[in-house]
Image (cartoon, grey):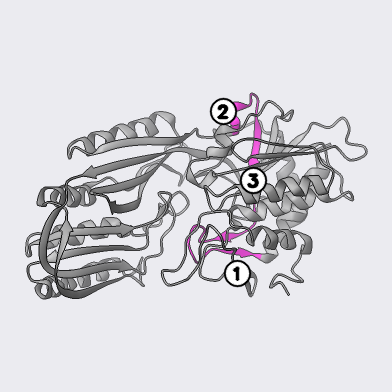
């Protein structure tokens, strides 16, 4: 029996359970798109599927809503795949193992994928129902949102008649989102021929950090494992001679990295360990209020011969980690408490004589985003790194005349007896891509309560899912 049996709304969670059984990490979209396509066929609904595996499913208006403006319901069908270090799963082939913990739905050892699978489940359930009132629905399921909104960028919007959209990729039940940041991916590659070296093997692992979404959590003071590694190695250069064998940390540029492992060859590994542990105590005391679970494990190995990076590359590597801009750069002057511009060094790994630094850049202003790219370009040019940018997506600017927002606020007040918070966010949403493609676009983003997305602690509030689903049905009924 499914762990979700009996949860309300039951059919929504049943669909979410089916989605969770299908591997659907970013870049692995065919099977989940097949599921959506078969869902449309089963319910005799017209659909379009493109080469990026985006799916648009059309449902005609219910009786009495024939003259209402059509409405887009939208969510993405990829998820961020993160797992506990020791948890055994192949995200390319295996589904998730879900369980209920009080009011929360979680996944064993992995991210839950409710960002944004719960949106797909709610929309699909609405599409199959014939007992609700609604305008013509154009349901859009986009792909590869988490790696640069690739699906939304590739989507042909010409089949869409609607100029209004409800995006279901927000994460707070009491909040309606009305603006978001644009962003891009920035990768720098530090190359150097390997050289044969010998010494005492040492492995240094940073772990226990909170991590989190690089847009939502970037202003919470969460520590970046890569930046801490640079700090430790920069300190140790004054006391010990060592060479870099390898480094690995972070899987996604848009997730604040909570772990990092590096392997070194040292002249005196025991001395390195003792001195480094002294310095780690200082860092731990400094950041303990923000990162109480922070740990650094240093393991000693045998004397070995290994291929290492040159001293020159090591110096450039430490310089990059120690001096790179990271986290919040500017706060908005127009919107209170809104991060305007930030970046996150989310990926750090070595392979084939190359070290890769992968960043997610964000800004609510196009000009500031471009300036940030230029800043990083000049920074990495100093150490002769190769540079690659991509995954650009536009910001979504606030519309003070949104009729959809007014309908939402009315329905929210009727259901909860209070006004919702109206917020702009620093995270990227596909709303910006749609707004860039569709003239006179009116959009809001809503969703159930989701916590610690993009981490293995991701959890979905069951009760808030029922509440937001009920609210969504009320909005549809009022779009007449």
Q: Residue at x 64, y 46 (%)?
A: 75
The residue singled out by tag 3 in the image is 75
Q: Position of residue 15 (x, y in %)?
A: 73, 58
The residue singled out by tag 1 in the image is 97
- Marks 2/3 in contact by CB < 8 Å: the verdict is no
The residue singled out by tag 2 in the image is 436
Q: Give yes or no for residue 443 being in the magenta stretch.
A: yes
Q: Nearer the viewer, mark 2 or mark 3?
A: 3
Q: Give yes or no for residue 381 being in the magenta stretch.
A: no
Q: Residue at x 57, y 50 (%)?
A: 78
**Magenta residues, start to end:** 434-461
Whether residue 417 can be seen here: no
- Counting residues from the N terminus, which is met first, the one under dot 1 or under dot 3? 3
Q: Position of residue 9 (x, y in %)?
A: 77, 62
- Marks 2/1 in contact by CB < 8 Å: the verdict is no
Query: Quarter of the image holding residue 468?
Result: bottom right
* Left or right of 27 on screen, residue 124: right
Q: CA distance from mark 2 to mark 1?
A: 38 Å
* Left or right of 20 on screen, residue 59: right
Whether residue 8 can be seen here: yes
Which is more toward the observer, 399 or 310?
310
Which is more toward the observer, 387 or 338?
387
* Left or right of 109 on screen, residue 448: right
Mark 3 falls on what kind of element?
Answer: strand
């Amino acid at each position: 029996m499914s762990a979700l049996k009996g949860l309300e709304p039951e059919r929504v969670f049943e669909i979410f359970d089916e989605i969770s059984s299908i591997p659907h990490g970013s870049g692995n979209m065919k099977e989940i798109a097949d599921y959506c396509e078969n869902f449309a066929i089963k319910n005799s609904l017209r659909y379009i599927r493109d080469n990026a595996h985006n799916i648009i499913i059309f449902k005609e208006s219910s009786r009495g809503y024939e003259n209402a403006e059509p409405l887009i319901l939208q969510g993405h069908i990829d998820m961020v795949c993160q797992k506990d270090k020791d948890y055994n799963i192949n995200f390319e082939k295996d589904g998730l193992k879900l369980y209920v913990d009080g009011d929360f739905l979680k996944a064993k050892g992995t991210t839950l994928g409710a960002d944004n699978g719960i949106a797909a489940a709610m929309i699909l359930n609405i599409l199959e129902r014939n007992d609700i009132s609604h305008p013509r629905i154009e349901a859009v399921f986009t792909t590869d949102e988490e790696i640069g909104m690739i699906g939304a960028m590739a989507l042909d919007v010409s089949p869409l008649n609607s100029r209004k959209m409800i995006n279901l990729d927000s994460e707070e039940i009491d909040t309606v989102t009305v603006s978001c940041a644009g962003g891009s991916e920035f990768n720098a590659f530090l190359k150097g021929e390997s050289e044969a070296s010998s010494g005492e093997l040492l492995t240094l692992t940073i772990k226990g950090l909170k991590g989190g979404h690089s847009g939502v959590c970037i202003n919470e003071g969460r520590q970046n494992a890569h930046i801490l590694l640079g700090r430790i190695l920069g300190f140790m250069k004054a006391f010990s001679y060592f060479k870099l064998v390898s480094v690995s940390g972070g899987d996604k540029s848009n997730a604040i990295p909570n772990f990092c492992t590096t392997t070194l060859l040292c002249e005196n590994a025991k001395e390195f360990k003792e001195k480094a542990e002294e310095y780690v105590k200082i860092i731990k005391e400094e950041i303990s209020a923000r990162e109480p679970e922070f740990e650094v494990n240093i393991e000693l190995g045998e004397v070995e011969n290994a291929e290492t990076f040159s001293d020159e590359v090591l110096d450039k590597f430490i310089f990059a980690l120690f001096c790179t801009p990271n986290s919040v750069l500017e706060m908005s002057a127009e919107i209170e408490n809104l991060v305007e511009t930030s970046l996150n060094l989310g990926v750090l790994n070595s392979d084939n004589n190359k070290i890769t630094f992968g960043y997610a850049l964000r800004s609510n202003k196009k000009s500031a985003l471009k300036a940030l790219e230029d800043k990083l370009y000049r920074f990495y040019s100093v150490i002769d790194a190769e540079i690659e940018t991509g995954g650009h997506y536009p910001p979504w600017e606030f519309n003070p005349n949104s009729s959809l927002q007014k309908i939402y606020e009315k329905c929210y007040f009727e259901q909860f007896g209070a006004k919702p918070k109206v917020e702009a966010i620093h995270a990227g949403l596909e709303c910006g891509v749609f707004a860039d493609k569709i003239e006179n676009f009116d959009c809001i983003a809503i969703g159930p309560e989701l916590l610690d997305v993009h981490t293995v602690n991701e959890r979905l509030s069951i009760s808030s899912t029922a509440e937001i689903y009920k609210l969504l049905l009320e909005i549809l009924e009022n779009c007449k």
